[in-house]
Amino acid sequence: MTDLVTFGETMLRLSPPRGDRLETTRELAVQAGGAESNVAVGAARLGVDAAWLSKLPDSPLGRRVTSELRSHGVSPGVAWTDPAESRVGTYYLEHGGVPRGTNVIYDRADAAITTVEPDELPTETLTGAQWFHTTGITPALSPTAAATTTALLRHAGEAGVTRSFDLNYRSKLWEPDEAREAYAALFEHVDVLFVPRRDAREVLGRDGSAVEVAHGLATAHGFETVVVTRGDEGALALTDGDVYEQPVFEAETFDAIGTGDAFVAGFVAERLHGGDVSDALEWGAATAAVKRTTDGDLAVTTRAEVESVVAGGDEISR
Amino acid sequence: MTDLVTFGETMLRLSPPRGDRLETTRELAVQAGGAESNVAVGAARLGVDAAWLSKLPDSPLGRRVTSELRSHGVSPGVAWTDPAESRVGTYYLEHGGVPRGTNVIYDRADAAITTVEPDELPTETLTGAQWFHTTGITPALSPTAAATTTALLRHAGEAGVTRSFDLNYRSKLWEPDEAREAYAALFEHVDVLFVPRRDAREVLGRDGSAVEVAHGLATAHGFETVVVTRGDEGALALTDGDVYEQPVFEAETFDAIGTGDAFVAGFVAERLHGGDVSDALEWGAATAAVKRTTDGDLAVTTRAEVESVVAGGDEISR
Amino acid sequence: MTDLVTFGETMLRLSPPRGDRLETTRELAVQAGGAESNVAVGAARLGVDAAWLSKLPDSPLGRRVTSELRSHGVSPGVAWTDPAESRVGTYYLEHGGVPRGTNVIYDRADAAITTVEPDELPTETLTGAQWFHTTGITPALSPTAAATTTALLRHAGEAGVTRSFDLNYRSKLWEPDEAREAYAALFEHVDVLFVPRRDAREVLGRDGSAVEVAHGLATAHGFETVVVTRGDEGALALTDGDVYEQPVFEAETFDAIGTGDAFVAGFVAERLHGGDVSDALEWGAATAAVKRTTDGDLAVTTRAEVESVVAGGDEISR
Amino acid sequence: MTDLVTFGETMLRLSPPRGDRLETTRELAVQAGGAESNVAVGAARLGVDAAWLSKLPDSPLGRRVTSELRSHGVSPGVAWTDPAESRVGTYYLEHGGVPRGTNVIYDRADAAITTVEPDELPTETLTGAQWFHTTGITPALSPTAAATTTALLRHAGEAGVTRSFDLNYRSKLWEPDEAREAYAALFEHVDVLFVPRRDAREVLGRDGSAVEVAHGLATAHGFETVVVTRGDEGALALTDGDVYEQPVFEAETFDAIGTGDAFVAGFVAERLHGGDVSDALEWGAATAAVKRTTDGDLAVTTRAEVESVVAGGDEISR
Amino acid sequence: MTDLVTFGETMLRLSPPRGDRLETTRELAVQAGGAESNVAVGAARLGVDAAWLSKLPDSPLGRRVTSELRSHGVSPGVAWTDPAESRVGTYYLEHGGVPRGTNVIYDRADAAITTVEPDELPTETLTGAQWFHTTGITPALSPTAAATTTALLRHAGEAGVTRSFDLNYRSKLWEPDEAREAYAALFEHVDVLFVPRRDAREVLGRDGSAVEVAHGLATAHGFETVVVTRGDEGALALTDGDVYEQPVFEAETFDAIGTGDAFVAGFVAERLHGGDVSDALEWGAATAAVKRTTDGDLAVTTRAEVESVVAGGDEISR
Amino acid sequence: MTDLVTFGETMLRLSPPRGDRLETTRELAVQAGGAESNVAVGAARLGVDAAWLSKLPDSPLGRRVTSELRSHGVSPGVAWTDPAESRVGTYYLEHGGVPRGTNVIYDRADAAITTVEPDELPTETLTGAQWFHTTGITPALSPTAAATTTALLRHAGEAGVTRSFDLNYRSKLWEPDEAREAYAALFEHVDVLFVPRRDAREVLGRDGSAVEVAHGLATAHGFETVVVTRGDEGALALTDGDVYEQPVFEAETFDAIGTGDAFVAGFVAERLHGGDVSDALEWGAATAAVKRTTDGDLAVTTRAEVESVVAGGDEISR
């Protein structure tokens, strides 16, 4: 029985070796990456029976995506399309460092998911599931994808499934105004909101402290839980009127991409495992910390490892 | 002074290691590849002052293409576009072997070149040039690209530049009927035609022997020279009523992609170097043979090396 | 619903780069390999819902195995054990060529599977399955593994599941006499036998032509089908008194390891897909041919690709 | 003439690329690693004529070990065994970082060395040698290996060779009580003891300051010299009633594995080169610092380089 | 029209993977590196039309150098020589870290450039150019190279071209006294001097503060501008009696080699782009900072990227 | 006790990946290669106690050479020189294939060995040795190296050591006339001559059949044994008036470089092992065949493997 269902686009992530640049490289590492499948993978690795819904061309490139997700135990529920008519989104990632930073180039226009409709997807997996998760990236991809996002959230709500939503605002996909309007329409179908402090201010127009933001959003949209993330300052959750704070765990960062998704994965996995919101925040932070030490979008970890981080110890033994 | 100008799309070629498959690979080699820039590179390496016209996004990916062409001495004449509005075409190449063969997956829809217009390009490089080359791929990419192909051929003709055209029919881009009609409109602006025997039959509807095909096409369209290629059976040229035959040179094939472009490069380079059609065929065949021994689309060779193949000797010395 | 269940050991396969030798290498490619999971993977890739039963330490190395199998769609049914008490078998593979050949070094003693007992395994997956497959390697690993093999075959038979057995004699694991005796005890629980012509003679003591061997074995042990493989000479099947012959498909071999398992995978997949024994032989041969062109033990292919080989065509397109 | 003889197990160390994890990797770097051969290599590179005694299967994997040791100038004195009857120990090393840390998985059970007996080894190399070194790992491997350790220490003592012993407690191999008892029996044959402060407390039950520990151990067991190592706090030696302290040299750590062995190598090399205990501590610390900057277990360095670190300078020149 | 012309030796740079050492490595990365071509490449990437003059054997190794420079848009003006009579200089680079540091081994004796004479070079490119740059390495290579350096500086001066000179003292090539004398003879032909604070003291014998050094040198040799670099303390320029100071930009260093050349490239590019000395210092510092984050000698960057560093922001977006 | 001593230059061999070309590559594999050390390594791997005499700079590059030779069990007897005054020879190797073939570029001028004098070398290793081997490359490197070659051959003769000489004519080092004269002076100190049929004709001016060549040379110079190699046609030996013929063993060639040295290694090893000339030819041919299947100059093999080739069997087992 599937516990968690996520929905969204997964791309091929192409990245040159460290120190090398996209405009001169002769070699690209290939990995699967997408906010919602990142969450599914992270949760699956923490013991959750997880599925992921999406649309892909029935080609080696489309199967490249599902192959990697399956390897982590995620069940792909894919609307396969004619490869002559559609494509897999890709993104090019160049790790820099101060001062040039990390650079991401998207090549995701017209990806198969932009035409996804609810009835193409195996939405029956939602029946009996406990949790549904999607993010603010999907509605930005196309009007059709936005409508399908709404439909799935509504469907999940009707099936009594807890629905979480990670704002994940992407300035390369749309403008704040456009995004705010789209979010507002979705929020009525959301139970748990994850939102970065900065996006709350810049996109949703919510000033004030993180607590104030959480209260404001919860009041305005009736969220059961609001989790505000603040980068190095840690996360904060408001639920049933109670506020919980969670600092970040120290981590030697190898690759920061996917940290937020790992946080959500840890949070959801612990909630599904019976933990309360406070426990879930801690698991979120610990999963995120492990993620930072590994290459790729995915939180390649285990329950034992995250438990050990939560318990505070990391040991170098021989 | 530029001697040779080519025009067309160049893509990023992405290929997994030998024995690995696209749907499981974690690593892709990146190279630049495109029929017309392949010809420019091959000719440049044989001593020709070569330029290549195209349209690319002004991004690391666009510059990845020009960087590689420049390294071989080709001058890129690029209409740079806003990377937020356009993309670089890519193609995924998986080398197989009997029985599964080599597989190519194009991801070139909506590449920047599909919107290319003549006045974006530095067409002044054609003035004073001796040779212009393009292929049947470009007109298949979009009506705009087709119109620009015609305009450049016409412009070259007005400037007294010899114009060659490689049929390069791509069944993944259009249907034979559509292609035939487009070719017919272009042929009046072409002096030298390169055409595979098979495409002559299946696309142009020309049956009969290679000689008959050459005569038929020359008569119908007034070509100065027609070169019919027949794979392992070698090439044949008809010019001024004379027929020349050229067998292939033996080669241990490492990578067959780009063989036809290498042939054209060798042919054109030798013509520009003063050789007659017979010499040019021999240089074409020799350049193609060297190409097959190297990785990638490009004929990474030198005049000395091709001369040595033409002269018949390859030596293992130490 | 699972269609195919296989049972056996899967090892980590460690191999140096081509041209390099184990005794000097600094780099080993890691892949999962084991006769029975090779069959499960091959069949899963051809559309069969396949599971694989085994025993592994609950460690990153054990999970390395299941991760790779899952990526191809196989459901692992693993008895996970304490990693402090058990190990994952490994095998080192060095590709040579004439005259030194390919060398395999096993390091599989005391692997977790040697202690596997039926009640540790999720044998309920057999209920409702259509086919069960195991090989002559498993009973050679330990008396416990042999007893469990017998138990599973018996259990499958009681559940009305077709049972196939690939002799897979390994001279490094036991002597012919010992093997013959063990096989004889298992044969009564087997419906479909795969046996190399050479092993039939050297281990089972069956001389005569392949047809005679098949008849002799079928008569002696009551097999529904006997498939005799003869390397380059192709395979032969005897079923219901009818004999079918199947030549091999031409293939440029990149890695021959796993060819026999790919053959079984193709055969079983086609039988489960409704094909008769003759069709199944053809699918076996075609799957084996594709396998030879790829790196690793696994037949990384698709229905479409195998169909295309069966149909006789492999095309290099661009 | 051999100056230094060491005795112990050397394994194949298998490690994935940085950022990658054992459970997903497709590539493992192979290196030889073992506490006692690490010391032999480090000392040999610093000009000592060093031999190493052990037992290995006569296979490419066994020779892989000796090949690497020989490359650094160490003379292997190996009892070669039938590869069908024995194995080479391996260990899998995954470099992490805070918070998950470095993970080591041993697969060394039943390695050839567990059956090593003194008369299989070329113990004549001890005659005329000046120093013999072994560690607390070897006696933990098997009773036979423990007995052979004792025998070699006794033999070395009879031959007038200085005997050093590095406690090297491995919690994955035995319990503190068991270890303490075994150590106690060996200590009477040891002249120079290397012991980490933590193991002194947790395994040997010695509380108090490092000086007190050193005094206590020297008094109890009659050691000529006791060297107590304290990680980042540096080392301390007690010899002839005098105490010497040595801080660590600053180092940018690439790989910390083998640091302790490099320390011993530097110490022993300098003692054999005529330095006093104080000089030896400094060489130990400097060799350890260089080791940390390099990949693998081994201190790949030179006398000139260590001298330069001792002298305090490291220069980036061009 | 060429804006910038540089002159000097470019070598093949050969470096082992991080953590590996030259004396044990089996793999070397190959890159082109040389102070003057580093400047040409950096400036070309910042929009300057740059050429580089040198002498190389007409061999694959010589062409390996020009191929890489061309890829960045630099026009090579090479005196090609008989490869049987000359060689390409190489340098081996091993990245260490504290305490062993970075090690460079030159193998540049008798490189083709040691015989370079002015009339072999396409010095006509100087006519119409705006800037000529060379360094103190070239005169150290041979008396002939020194004479040619003088001749080119004189020729540039006669053509009204601004001439810059980077002291670049190399202690492996000559002694301070010898160098000082050679520099003195060249200084009369130099308009802009780049000099490290340390070399000013140790080679030119100029004590005092950086400002005093700049004033002293400007007064003594009539330089238009003197730029004194002080490593982490930033740079200082004296021009027309005014002093400008520039701190370094923060950078996570991947590879420090080429930092000084990147500084010069940024400085010259901004001067040619119309910036004043203060702007040029800032561009120099920013280009140097980006260089440090990339692998190799070259500043692989763009105007937009350096502008963004100058403007103070680096963003990690996704 | 050393059985075999060889003398000659060993270079660093630098080669790009297959399919890549020197003029575009970014990566070079590094290996040690030199005719005489190739023989020492091959013989050492076949059980001979082998030493190799040479001269190298005391640098990481010089030690890179000895490190690799030591790993195969060869004892280096090196005259170490000041790295500021000398260099290690290198050679660049590009594997092609028909028609471009394999290309070798030497960069060995002024290598340390060109100044080698007998009294720098540990010639005492010759005392008690059974065999001394050198080749026609060494005298071509410099007059000093030639004189030292003569001195060592004479010294070996006086010590009663069998002396073999492989003609190994290198057209890139000297002219036939010059070589012939040098060889003639050396031949009086040689007992066993290895000579390719072609060099016998083109350099030594000996026409006629291989047997006639052998007789002619044996008569003219008093060789005990003459071995004439004829590529694919196999080898022929004349000794004591008897003629032995040896065909080549079939081999799938991965890398042909070093085949001739492997032949000599196998021949010498078998002679030292007590085999007669006929056995030695067979071992030479078998060692050469194994060599062809491996990457690099060296015959990385074992007695067991060569015995198995001699016995005619190569098996692929699993």
Image: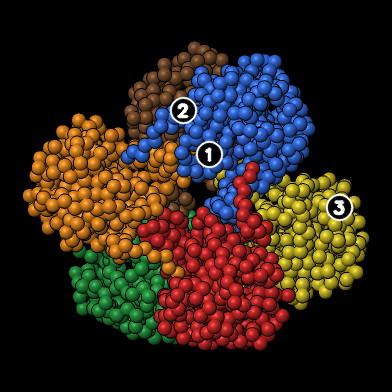
Chain colours: A orange, B brown, C green, D red, E blue, F yellow
Query: Which residue: 64% across, 43% down?
Result: D318
In the rendered structure, which amino acid carries the disc numbered 3? Answer: Thr
The part of the image, by quadrant, that contains residue A182 is top left
Query: Which residue: 53% across, 43% down?
Result: E255
The chain holding disc 3 is: F
Query: Label 2: which residue?
Result: E303
Mark 2 residue element:
helix
In the rendered structure, which amino acid carries the disc numbered 2? Answer: Arg
Q: Is residue A235 above or below residue E238?
A: below
Residue C64 in view here = no
Query: Label 3: which residue?
Result: F144
In the rendered structure, which amino acid carries the disc numbered 1? Answer: Asp
The crowd level at tag 1 (other Cα within 10 Å; few <14, some 14-19, many 20+) is few
| Residue occupying the far top of the picture | B158
Calculate the distance from the C-alpha at mark 3 to the C-alpha at mark 2.
56 Å
Calculate the distance from the C-alpha at mark 1 to the C-alpha at mark 3.
50 Å
